[in-house]
Image (cartoon, helix red, strand yellow):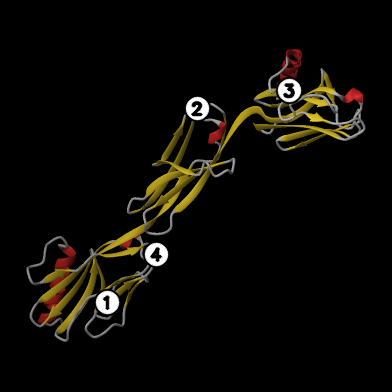
Amino acid sequence: MCNPACFIFTVWLTALLVYPGVPARSGDSYLKDNITVRQGDSAVLKCNVDNKVSRVAWLNRTTILFTGNEKWSLDPRVVLLNTAVTEYSIKIINVNLYDEGPYVCSILTNKKPESTKVHLIVQVPARIVNISADVSVNEGSNVSLMCLAIGRPEPSIFWKFRSSKGDGKGNRIITEGEYVEMTGITKDMSGSYDCITSNDISPPDVRTVQVTVNYPPVISRARSTGTAVGQKGVLWCEASAVPLADFQWYKGERRLFNGLNRVKIENKGKQSMLTFFNVSEEDYGNYTCVAMNTLGITNASIILYGPGAIHDVNNAALSPTSSFLLLTLVLTLSFISKF
């Protein structure tokens, strides 16, 4: 049979469970500071007692966790700590969001019931939960990137651009928020877009969207060369393009092929080289480097000349000559018809 003290304690616990929102009378309870923990960490809820206490209990919302040393909760994460005689504390292991809320330490003394109220706040590290897939678009298109993140407190999101050129000039923060909108995208906007989210609970979460901008070839460098008869001569040109350009070489309107007429053609990435192993008088003249991909075609005129000839060796005509316009048109139609 429950004695009067036990009966009072039971009524007190029942009142706390049934009417959790009813404030305690003045002097019956006091509110401790909020306890803030990170999701996944452990939380220790402390309750100070003295030798006049006859019964104690921990409650959470409408659930009794412990009464004395007896555990009522079925949650294995909630344990009673072996603390000092003047302290009655519990520990919640691997805290999650469902643990957030008010906790009450109920104390029954010889005089009257008292309670200590604690509010547990759970913080969640910022984490990216959804982000756009890598995209490949043609120059001039519109691009929209998305990055969604969760966390408590609400995380901030910003975007950082890293240029595909690798020159470091494009490494900059471009915008804040979940979305990036780009209209009329250019090849200079091709690269990595880092979505970075943080709420200062843990290191930032970073994920990357790769944006590839396709554009027609642009011959950026071409060099004429002076070489004596019998010597080795090299003509080369370089074209930027996405996808990478295919190269062809012509002398006049006659296409040159690797291994024929004492020439070698080597294509390596953005560069193409036309090599003469034993230059003859017949080799001197104007050559055309043609660069093409699915988006377009361009060419540059390059000259192989002999000693004593006056030429600007650092420059070449980067626009089609009039005699080459018809050939360019034919090549364009032929190349596009393959796709």
Residue ID at (82%, 30%): 226
Given contact means CB atoms under 8 Å apart, are the residues at marks 1 and 2 in contact?
no
Assess disc 2: are there few (<14), some (14-19) or many (≥20) residues with their C-alpha within 10 Å of its C-alpha. Answer: few
The image position of residue 167, as x and y in percent, is 57, 43
Q: Earlier in the sequence, mark 2 or mark 3?
A: 2
Disc 2 designates what residue? 184
Disc 4 designates what residue? 40
Disc 1 designates what residue? 89
- Can you say whether 233 is above or below 42 in the image? above
Disc 3 designates what residue? 335
Q: Quadrant of the C terminus?
A: top right
Measure the C-alpha gap from mark 4 to mark 3: 59 Å
Measure the C-alpha gap from mark 2 to mark 3: 26 Å
Say which mark, if any, is on residue 13: none
Measure the C-alpha gap from mark 1 to mark 2: 62 Å
Give the SS element for disc 2.
loop
Amino acid marked by disc 1: Ser
